[in-house]
Amino acid sequence: MNIQASKPAAIAPVVSTPVFAAMPKVSRIRPIIAQVLPPLLVLAVLIAAWQFLASGPNATLPPPTKVWADARDLIVDPFYDRGGLDKGLFWHLLASLQRVALGFALAAVAGILLGLLIGTSDFAMRGLDPI
């Protein structure tokens, strides 16, 4: 038996460098730009087209600059209430959520009552089972 064959071979330590660390800064930025730039350009072109088309005399939609100004006013002070429909975003959101809660409650009551009717009556089950 050969003694040399039974000794483990010396293994050099493996030093790994992250892929981005090995790449120059320009090469690291290029893939990020390639993913971010096209959607931003498309969005910018769409907003510019919207602004151009909505600035005409027969436009039915407001331009994005007006939408942004009105939205900013609602967002900056969401709790103002000047009466009527002149209210902040919080009050509009609260009214919408109240409508959603009322609709959900009515649907839950209707579903529970219909389920009880179907569960307790064979006639109702045969008549309403396909629903």
Image: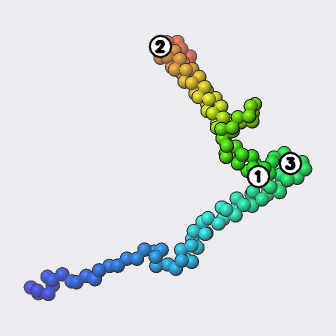
In the rendered image, residue 71, in percent from the top left (x then y), is placed at: 71, 46
Residue 34 location in percent, x, y? 61, 69
Q: Say whether residue 107 is visible.
A: no
128 to 43, vertically: above or below: above
Q: CA distance from mark 1 to mark 2?
A: 57 Å
Which residue position holds label 3? 59
Q: Earlier in the sequence, mark 2 or mark 3?
A: 3
Q: Give amino acid for label 1.
A: Pro
Residue depth check, mark 2 versus mark 3: number of the one nearer the observer: 3
Check disc 2 and report the residue beneath it.
Answer: 120
Instruction: Tell me the CA gap for discs 3 and 1.
Output: 12 Å
Residue name at image x 57 percent, y 68 percent: 32
The kind of secondary structure element at disc 3 is: loop
Q: Position of residue 89 (x, y in %)?
A: 67, 39
Q: Is residue 3 above or below residue 70?
A: below
Would you say 8 lies left or right of 108 here?
left
Given contact means CB atoms under 8 Å apart, are the residues at marks 2 and 3 in contact? no
Q: How far is mark 2 from mark 3, CA to CA?
A: 59 Å
Q: Secondary structure at mark 1?
A: helix
